[in-house]
Amino acid sequence: MAGWKPSPYVKYGYTEKKYKWTQTPEDVTLTIELPDENLKTKTDIQIIMKTNKFEMIIKGEVYIGGELEHAINVDDSTWTRDGKIIEVILSKGMDTKGDGEGCWWGCVIKGDHVIDVKRMESTKYLDDSLLKKLAEKDQEETAGKEEEEEEDQ
């Protein structure tokens, strides 16, 4: 989407147990910290990207993997390694782009935590001052819930 700019008040991804991710209208980026920096890229790590599936295999065991929430364009997807960090860029597949505006993903792998795609979609219609108010309201609600949980213990 030409001219798209992320709002500082919207979360475009999530931090899972073994990876964190974020997205733009064109792609999804996974940042994965390896459990051991001595792993060899060519022999110990295997990354499998299919239209509807992603797997990262370490020494023959699936470390992260499953069915993707949406299809990807495998030919335009890539990954790199920098020390202990693997960065995977999944190019959103053509069938997920709809009218060309980009499709927001609620999660990367089906069954993982789902984020609120409505908030991301609202960036097309709301300015940052309204998005900031919504983000502040979310923080207040989260803080209130945490206080209640502490009182219950």
Image: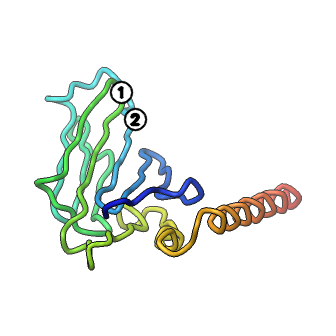
Whole-percent x, y for residue 151 in the image: 88, 58
- Count of numbered tags: 2
- 148 on left or right of 111: right
Confirm or deny contact between disc 1 and disc 2 (CB under 8 A): yes
Query: In this view of the protein, which residue sits in the foreground, 39 or 27?
Result: 27
Residue 117 vs 26, above or below: the answer is below
Whole-percent x, y for residue 57 in the image: 24, 43
Q: Which mark is residue 16?
A: none
The residue that mark 1 highlights is 84
Q: CA distance from mark 1 to mark 2?
A: 6 Å
The residue most toward the top is 38
Please report the residue visible at 47 percent of the width from the left and 51 percent of the height from the top. Answer: 16
Residue 107 vs 47, above or below: the answer is below
Residue 52 vs 31, above or below: the answer is below
Whole-percent x, y for residue 142 in the image: 73, 61
Quick one: SS at disc 2? strand
The picture quadrant where one finds residue 66 is bottom left
Dot 1 surroundings within 10 Å: few (below 14), some, or many (20 or more)?
Answer: few
The picture quadrant where one finds residue 81 is top left
Quick one: SS at disc 1? loop
The residue most toward the front is 3
Query: Could you tell me the amino acid type at mark 1?
Result: Lys
The residue that mark 2 highlights is 33
The residue most toward the left is 75
Please report the residue visible at 43 percent of the width from the left and 68 percent of the height from the top. Answer: 106
Can you say which quadrant of the picture contains the N terminus?
bottom left
Please report the residue visible at 21 percent of the width from the left and 62 percent of the height from the top. Answer: 72
Please report whichever mark, 1 or 2, sits nearer to the chain's N-terminal start: 2
